[in-house]
Amino acid sequence: MDMLELDGRGGGGQLLRSALTLALCTGTGFTMRGIRAARPRPGLMRQHLTAVQAACAISGSEATGATLGSTDLTFVPGAVVPGDYTFALGTAGSTMLVLQTLLPAFWRAGASSRVRLEGGTHNPMAPSADFIQHAYLPALRRIGVCADVALESHGFYPAGGGAVVATIEPCPGLQVAAFGERGPLVSVEATALLSALAASIGRRELAVLGKRLGLAEDRLHLHSVRPAVGPGNAVMVRVEHAGHVELFTGYGERGLPAEKVAERLAAQVRHYLDSQACVAEHLADQLLLPMALAGGGKFTTCVASDHLLSNAALIEKFVAVEIDCEPDGPDRWRVRVAA
């Protein structure tokens, strides 16, 4: 079996998750050293360890160094076995990041699979369950992926306690897709989620978003969700163009005024709208890997982030593709994945 030597010092947990996914999909093993070395708490945290353990559980893979805090990991992939799986993070660690690690491996399996994940569903440093449902999976369907995620209960940081269930169908062949132009604007809507917190917090967030983004009252939604293990607040803006949908999320923090949360979120949305790019920053990072497995694809994005560039370099080590990123005017980049 081929084994790669990978340097994890130049990025965060995304490099490890991408390496796990690609190892399962290509049969190429790896040793990664310096995992999250530049982070305040280096090495494997709970969500990273769960991703490693889940990758082993669905495939019979072997992992050496799979312990909390470990900065070195060797992963020897096995064959993915479709089925019904449950993984509990035990913390507010992101269920969505673990799910994204497993999804491509199940696309290439010979039968459908069901995965239940328990932990955080709305975390400040990870895609939310709503982002996966309303932005990530719809984009992947254009590549030929057939998968759905159902949110059973919300799990906010830091308590967690949420649950999601994903169903994944095998994909006999992925398609090369282009996300170049987003088309005319169809709608912009904002939603504030609250668990065990005063409704006034959400109303203040929505008032700012309505003003900054020019949204009418019927485009502002306040939802109180079933109380989670702990209190929580997330505010989201869904931007739909004729050819693409994006979801932006901000999170309430202790000591941070609701107005500030909404101002930050509005600035992200305005930057995206003003850029004329099709794909926003976070989805851009996440499209590279499925496009590489499809053998090609392209998109425009408003930010060529360090995450995107480091992820591209890692993907090229596993898959015979070239990933180019070139500026295309103010706040717009063209990214191309080619075999």
Image (cartoon, grey):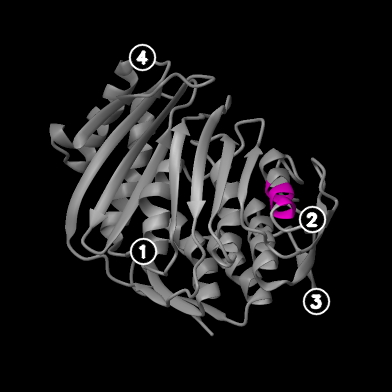
Identify which residue is drawn at 23% across, 41% down.
Answer: 189
Residue located beneath label 1 in the image: 331
| Nearer to me, 213 or 130 | 130
Q: Position of residue 89 (x, y in %)?
A: 66, 36
Q: Quick check: can you spot residue 39? A: no
**In the figure, 243 relative to 225: above or below?**
below
Badge nearest the viewer, 3 or 1:
3
- Label 3's element? loop
Badge nearest the viewer, 4 or 2:
4
Which circle's residue, 3 or 4, is located before the other in the chain? 3
Res. 198 mark:
4
Identify which residue is drawn at 27% across, 38% down.
Answer: 190
| Nearer to me, 289 or 200 | 289
Residue located beneath label 2 in the image: 34
- Highlighted range, magenta: 51-57
- Label 1's element? loop
